Structures are given as C-alpha cells and as structure tokens.
Amino acid sequence: MARLSQKAASILSDTCALSRGDRLMIILPPTPETYWICLACMQLGITFIPGSPQLPAKEICCRLRMSKAQCVVSGEVMAPVVDSVMFNCPTLKTKLLVSDKSYDGWLDFKELFQVAPPRKTCVRTDSQDPMAIFFTNRKMGTPKLVEYSQYGLGMGFSQASRQWMDLQPTDVLWSLGDAFGGTLSLSTAFGAWLQGACVFLHHMPTFCPETVLNALSRFPITTLSGNPWMYQKLLQHKYFTSYRFKSLKHCVAAGGSISPGVTEAWNRITKLDIYEGYGQTET
C-alpha cells in the first residue's frame, strides 16, 4: 500500500499540480484506488473530501462549491454528472478518471499509474492541519461542511476501530458503505489497519443482497459494517434464513439511523447485535 500510494501521490503532485492545502473530492466506491488516493492525499497534505457515487448532480455541485475543491476523482458513471455541474464550480481545475475506459476532458488515472514513479517524500503536516472534509447528513437539514484535523481524524479512526468495531489483529472487516459515508469506509480501512486487522474488498457496481450473503458465507469475514437500509435489504432476501455466517461475530451500522425492527430481526436470525454509530460527523 505504501508503494502504490506513493505512485498515486506522484500523479496528484506532478500531473494534477496539487500541493499542500489543496482540496480533492473523491467520488468512488470502496476500491483499492480509493485508498491509494486517500493515502496519497495524506502524504501530500491535500485535504480529501469523500462523496458517495449515489449523490445526485445538485448535491455534488453543492459540495464542490462549498469545499472549493481544485480536483475531483470519479468513475465513468459519475463523470458525466460532474461535467454537467462543472460550469458552476469555478475552483475545479482537474478531473481524474478511475476507469478502464477513457472519457473526454478527464485524465486517465490507470494509464498514468502504469508509468508514475513512487514519490518518496512526504509533507510534514502539523497535528491541526486539515486531513479530510465530511458533510453532515441531509436528514439533519442543509448539509454542513465539517473539517477534520490530522490528529482529530487519526484519533477518531483509532477510537472507532477499537471500541465501536471491536477490531483485533485476527479480524477481517468488510464495509458495505459507499465511498464514503464518513464513518463507514474510512473507518473500515484506516481503522482496521491501526488495529492490525484485514480489510475485505468486493467490488459491486450496485448493491446486491445475494452477492453479500454468498460472500459472508464463503469468506472468513468477522466484522460487517453497513448502512441501515443494507441490513434491511439483506433481511428481505427470500433465502436469508438459509445462509450461515460461520465467521461473523460483530456488526455495526452508520450513515443513517437504524429502526428497532431491523436490529431485532437481525438479532433473532443471526444472534448478533448491530452497533449503531450514526451521527458522528454531526457531533
């Protein structure tokens, strides 16, 4: 991960001309490239702004304008959505595409990645320098920009992974959240690494309950993190009760409030509780 993120850092600094203090919005599902780019931002002192691939154009425009992001990273599905609002985002200068296909007006991350040299030096950030910007849930009213420092977010990852997710070095954690509900995917990767745990990635263009249930049955996933509606979708699968999750021992939910009915049904069938972490960005 260190070497691969150094190659991503080379792209951001040399090709995209980003430097310390700049802001980058990333609209990708949880993929290896997502984490390479976030780690690269930390190495360069660039503030990253997670955004879900499910966001509508109006919301993307609002976040780009509020954050004054200079660069956006996206997949091929969201590229035309970003292009449709770009004329309203004067600070946006660079668009980086993570896809096997090319798109007019976008830099090709995978093509650049093949030839990018690892960038060996890191910016010496201070503890109060910004690391990331999250946006509060729209259900709480108009989304507000929340900036996290290097120290604050780093400690947040550590606390969440140890106390809320109960992660140990022997655990394998899978986040079903979009990249990124602030709590879900970032706590998944960085929090897991801080505890020496493993991160499980399974690329799904769209959420598929059957794929999730098969993976939970087949692989040694010990900890599951997901949005409340995802747990509900899993419970609604007609063959849910026929699946057995031999390794699963801890479940957490964030990205929205979870109804008592869902937690009760999940516990009744799986004998596991769902530990809720909704509202961490808001508070």
Image: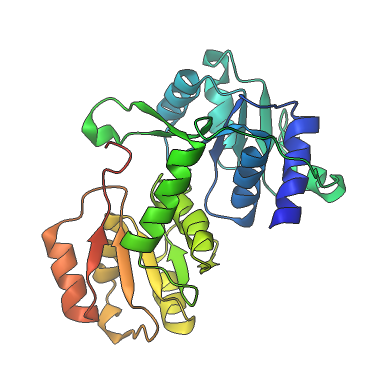
Q: Position of residue 174 (x, y in %)?
A: 45, 66
Q: How many numbered marks, from 0 up?
A: 0
The quadrant of the picture occupied by the C terminus is: top left
**232 vs 104, nearest the viewer:** 232
Q: Position of residue 199 (x, y in %)?
A: 53, 66
**40 on left or right of 28:** right
**41 on left or right of 11:** left
The quadrant of the picture occupied by the N terminus is: bottom right
Asked if residue 204 shows in the view, the reply is no
- The image quarter containing residue 272 is bottom left
Residue 245 vs 42, above or below: the answer is below
- The image quarter containing residue 12 is top right
The residue located at (40%, 47%) in the rendering is 156
The residue located at (20%, 55%) in the rendering is 258
**229 vs 197, nearest the viewer:** 197
**225 on left or right of 139:** right
**280 vs 219, nearest the viewer:** 280
The residue located at (41%, 28%) in the rendering is 59
Question: What colouring method underlies this structural image?
Answer: rainbow
Residue 174 vs 48, above or below: the answer is below
Asked if residue 63 shows in the view, the reply is yes
Q: Position of residue 165 (x, y in %)?
A: 35, 63
Q: Position of residue 104 (x, y in %)?
A: 73, 31
